Image (spheres, rainbow, N blue to C red):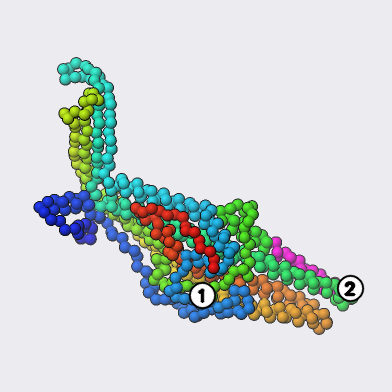
Amino acid sequence: MNRSGFRRVASTRRHRGPGWRPAVALLALLGGCAVGPDFTSPAPPPGAEGTAYTPTPLAAQTASAPGIIAGESQRLVLGQDIPAQWWTVFHSEALDALIRSALAQNPTLASAQAALRQSQEIYTAQTGALRYPNIGLRVNAERERAALATGRLGTYNLFNVGVDVSYQLDLFGGNTRALESYAAAVDYQRFQVEATYLTLVSNLVSTAILEASLRAQVKATREVLELLERQLKVVNVQFDAGAVARSAVLTQQTQIAQARATIPPLEKSLAQAQHQLSVLAGRLPSEAGMPEFNVDSLRFPQELPLTLPSSLVRQRPDIRASEALLHEASAQVGVATAAQYPQVTLGAGYGSASSTTSGLFRADSAIWNFGAGLVQPIFNGGQLSAQKRAAEAAYDQAQAQYRATVLSAFQNVADSLRAIQSDADTLRAQAEAESTARESLRIANEQYRLGAVSFLLLLDTQRSYAQTRIALVQAQAARYASTAALFQALGGGWWNEGPLADASRPGSEAVIERPRLAPVR
């Protein structure tokens, strides 16, 4: 860029012979130079050069709860790449089949892919309109009665055939910046497809985990309910023998009713999760064939990849989409700046005109024209200056939105890392609490049969066990969910997918469909 803000265009090819100077001058005239800022990708935010996402260091590995589902310790591997099909770390055939179906049928993903194809075609159309001459064939046939040169009225035919060519010189890069803007719009839609893909897969995984959790909670609640009903039989026997009062029976029945009342809300949430999975897979909720998920059918990954903070901005599709919008806004500043400079248009035409069709092919019927037009804005009430300032303000807005997107992305990763650590601690504590409550309930049942403890103590022990049993199931599901959330926060590995990661570039064939997924190993 020189001081005037123009980007100089120079030829690196060596020309020889006396005619090279006019050729270079013509190339410079036709190529022009582009006013406005030259876009460069924003640098990572300050503080992203290190390896930490949180102010306090994370433990080398998480806590463990041996013998419990999802109780294995997890270790973060800094710099390890993320597989494109990251959900396969759970080793669930049902989950893999569901995601395959959803990628083929989900309407939201199809809509994003259609928007990408639309933006590509718009770019192609604008490339033809702004970069190349406009050539048109003109054919006219007229019959007219008008005054002749003799002063008399006469009727005659006029046939006209020709080719017209027009071309607007891009002296100040307005067209170049416009194409740059359209190309950035293609990139935006491309990363929107990636973001939609990542969101869809993440929602499927998290909803499947939620369904497994709810199914486990229903199962645990029914087990607790069965235990309470068995205890009610013991209380009834003691009541019949006169060992306990009627109030003990009523209290136990109340405990059973309260436990039974928690099942319908859980079943409702379970049904809603199943309906959500159907919709995400592009099916009606009434369709059969949807898989069922259980916590014990999901393998818990013990190693998790962790991207360097400086690389996160290149991996998150929402950040890349925001960057594309910033690029588009930058190009629009150039478009608005170029509109303030002269616009030069070249035009030419060649053809023939005759009063007969046979005369069109005679040499003396040839007609031609050549011309150039220049338009220099002089006074427009400040319109062009205001449009430039508006474009600059839009660029500032896109820049602020980009920074907000980056900050939100780093927050997502930090939240996920802390969740992985705290969920492991929570599961270990809940496992210990459940084990202790289960043993306390066993002892309390035996002592109550022997008359060593009161019914109120037994009742409290039952309540404690029911609460810890449900809390343990929830803690197990939370570990799966936080693991999936980390993969989503890091970008999901879309850059390893292949065709879609390199598709949708201007001037290339677009490959919208995802490649066939590899089987789960």
Find residue 249 and report its horizontal and vertical position in percent. 82, 71
Looking at the image, the residue that sits furthest to the right is 241
Q: What's the magenta bit mostly, secondary-structure-wise?
A: helix
What residue sits 22% from the left and 23% below the top? 355
Left or right of 259 in this view: 134: left
- Residue segment shown in magenta: 245-265
Residue 487: give x, y in percent of width and height: 49, 68
Disc 1 to disc 2, C-alpha distance = 58 Å
In this rendering, the answer to whether 65 lies above or below 312 is below
Q: Which residue is mark 1?
A: 303
x and y percentages locating residue 367 in the rendered image: 19, 32
- Identified by mark 1, the residue type is Glu
Q: Give the labeled residue for mark 2.
A: 240
User: Is 249 part of what is drawn in magenta?
Assistant: yes
Residue occupying image coordinates x 57% and y 59%: 98
**Do the residues bearing badges 1 and 2 touch, measured as CB atoms within 8 Å?**
no
Residue name at image x 31 percent, y 60 percent: 39
Asked whether residue 223 is drawn in magenta, I would say no
Q: Is residue 159 visible?
A: yes
Q: Quadrant of residue 380?
A: top left
Residue at 25% of width from left, 52% of height from top? 173
- Asked if 178 appears above or below 446 in the picture, the reply is above
At label 2, the amino acid type is Asp
Residue with the most extreme bottom position? 452
Residue 465 vs residue 162: left or right?
right
